[in-house]
Amino acid sequence: MRIAFTSCFDVLDDPEQVVWDRVAAQRPDVMLLLGDSIYMDFGVNLPLLGVHSTHPLGKPRKWDEAKFAQEMYSRYRAQSEVNSFRSLVGSVGIIGAIWDDHDFAWNDSWGAGFDEDVVPRNKKLIARTLHLQFRDWLQKRPLVEYPAIPSMDSLLSTEDRGIEYSFSIGPVLFLMLDGRYYREKQREVPSPYPEIHPGEPLATMLGEAQKGWLAQTINDQDGLSVICSGSTLTDRNVNGADSWDRYTDFEWLLGQEFEQTVVLSGDIHDIRLKKHKKTGGGNLWEFTASGAARPGKFHGASGNFGIVDVDGRSITVQLFDEDGLRSKKVIDF
C-alpha cells in the first residue's frame, strides 16, 4: 500500500498547485490531507516592504456568520476547481482529510473553553458543516461538480462536536484526529527557571473523550496504526507553535503502550522526520510533510509531501520538497 500525505495549500495565493502532479506521479492508493486545505487568513500587509496579503491575519474574527460561511465556502469551492488537484483526487481510491487552524476558523484558533478568544459556537458549526461537505466531495467517484452552499439553517444544524474519525484499509488503521474543536487556550504552571525548563502544560488539545477514543481504537487494532495530526508533536521552543508539547496530550501520548504506531503531521511548512522517546521505552516516529502549495515571502513553502509504503511489518517513508527526495527512512516493527 502506498500512502501520500501533505498539508497547507492555499488556492488564493497559488491557484496552479503543481505539487499535485508530482504526487500523482507516485501513484498513491491513499491520500491524506492533514489540515489547512484552505486559508481563511494568512499573512500581513506591510506596504513599505512590498508585502500584501489577500487575506490578512485576523479578518475572519470580525466577519458575521453569513460572511464567514460565504468566505469559507468560496475557498473550498475554488480548491475543488484546481485542475491538478481534481486530477489527483479522481485518481486516488481513498482520501482522508482533517483540519487545522486556518481551515477551522483562523490562525492559532481553538474551540473549547470560555475565554473571549475561543471560536464562537455558530462559527464552529459552520466550519464543521463546510469541512464535511468538502470531505464528502473528495470521496465522490466519478468526481462531480462542487455542491452549492447549504442554507444557514443547514449550516447550524450539524452536531456540536469535532470531525475526528477512523478508517481501515486491510491491516492499516488510520486515526484522523481533530486538534482544534476541543483545544483549549494554552496555559501552564509557571516554572521558577523558565530559561532551563518550561512550565508544565495544563490545557488539553484533543479533549478527554477524543483521547479515550484514540486509545481504545488503537488498542483494538492488531496491525499498523497511523495517527494523523494537523499539529506536530514538538515545537514548543518556537514562538507561536501549536504543537502537542504545549498541552498535556503530549506526555499522555508518550505514556501509551501503542505498538506499530506512527504519527503523520503537518502545519510547519516544512518536512521532517523525528524520533520521540516513549515513557515506557521504545520510540514513536513522527513524519511531517507541510507546505504543499503555500507560497509567499514569509512562512511560505511549495512542493512538500510525503510517501509511506507499507509492506507487512515494515514501512518506508520518503519526504519530498520542490527539489525532489530529501529524506528517507525504513522502519521495521
Image (cartoon, grey):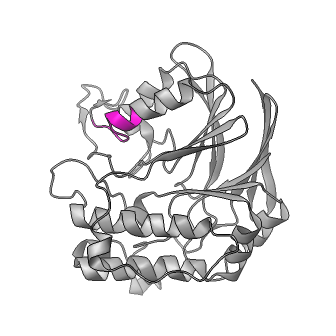
Residue 6, x across and y down, in percent = 64, 57
Decide if residue 310 is on the left or right side of residue 43: right
Residue at 79% across, 66% down:
24
In the image, residue 120 sits, relative to residue 195, either above or below, namely below
33 relative to 208 in the view: left or right: right
Residue 141: name its quadrant: bottom right
Front residue of this view, candidates 248 and 65: 65
**Residue 183: x percent and y percent?**
32, 46
* Residue 10 located left or right of residue 62: right
* Residue 98 point in image, percent of width and height: 50, 55
In this rendering, does residue 293 appear at all? Answer: yes
Is residue 106 visible in the rendered structure shown here? Answer: no
Q: Quadrant of the C terminus?
A: top right
Asked if the magenta segment contains residue 207, the reply would be yes
**Range drawn in magenta:** 203-211
Please name whichever residue, 258 or 141, is drawn nearer the observer in this view of the structure: 141
